[in-house]
Amino acid sequence: MIVLRTFLTLVAGFAAMAAVLALAAVMARWVGRKNGSEGGRSSAGEMAWNLAATLLAALVGGYVTATVAPLNPLIHALALALIVLLLGGMSAVQQRGQAPIWFALLMVALAPCAVILGGLLRLKQLGI
């Protein structure tokens, strides 16, 4: 039963991240239509928005994971950070050429750190 609860904890954290990123994508599309932006290579503003949204989503995901975790909230946040690291690496490889390599590496490196920070924020809130 604990394995199922752990799995559901990670799913909850990942779902929270997906919800924040979906909201950010909708907001970016709405702002992009107003400014008349078009597809193609990412601009500096788009990259900054993407980085900010990803870091916020990762922070929320780590916090939610640590909140829902049955035992050891930080271990669960670390597990989510590992998943985010692996998925971020695969995404960086898949999207090569759309953004500078330094930006892809920055996203891969900072998102797992933000997940852990979200878990630590929850631990601080609990007084642990």
Image: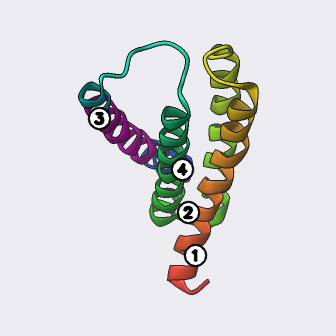
- The mark nearer the N terminus, 1 or 4, is 4
Q: Which is more toward the observer, 35 or 4?
A: 35
Q: Is residue 43 left or right of residue 117?
A: left
- Mark 4–mark 2 Cα distance, whole angstroms, equals 7 Å
Residue 50 in picture, x, y percent from top left: 50, 38
Q: Are marks 1 and 4 in contact (CB under 8 Å)?
A: no
- Mark 1–mark 2 Cα distance, whole angstroms, equals 9 Å
- The mark nearer the N terminus, 4 or 3, is 3
Magenta-span inclusion, residue 67: no
Check disc 4 and report its element: helix, strand or loop.
helix
In front: label 1 or label 2: 2
Q: Dot 1: within a 10 Å radius of its alpha carbon, few (fewer than 14), some, or many (20 or more) residues?
A: some
Q: Please, what is the three-letter code of the amino acid marked with disc 1? A: Leu
- Mark 4–mark 3 Cα distance, whole angstroms, equals 22 Å
The stretch of residues the image draws in magenta is: 15-31
Its colouring scheme is: rainbow
Report which residue position mark 2 lands on.
118
Q: Is residue 115 left or right of residue 21?
A: right
Q: Dot 2: within a 10 Å radius of its alpha carbon, few (fewer than 14), some, or many (20 or more) residues?
A: many
Report which residue position mark 1 lands on.
123
Q: Please, what is the three-letter code of the amino acid marked with disc 4? A: Ala
Magenta-span inclusion, residue 16: yes
Report which residue position mark 4 lands on.
58
Q: Please, what is the three-letter code of the amino acid marked with disc 3? A: Val
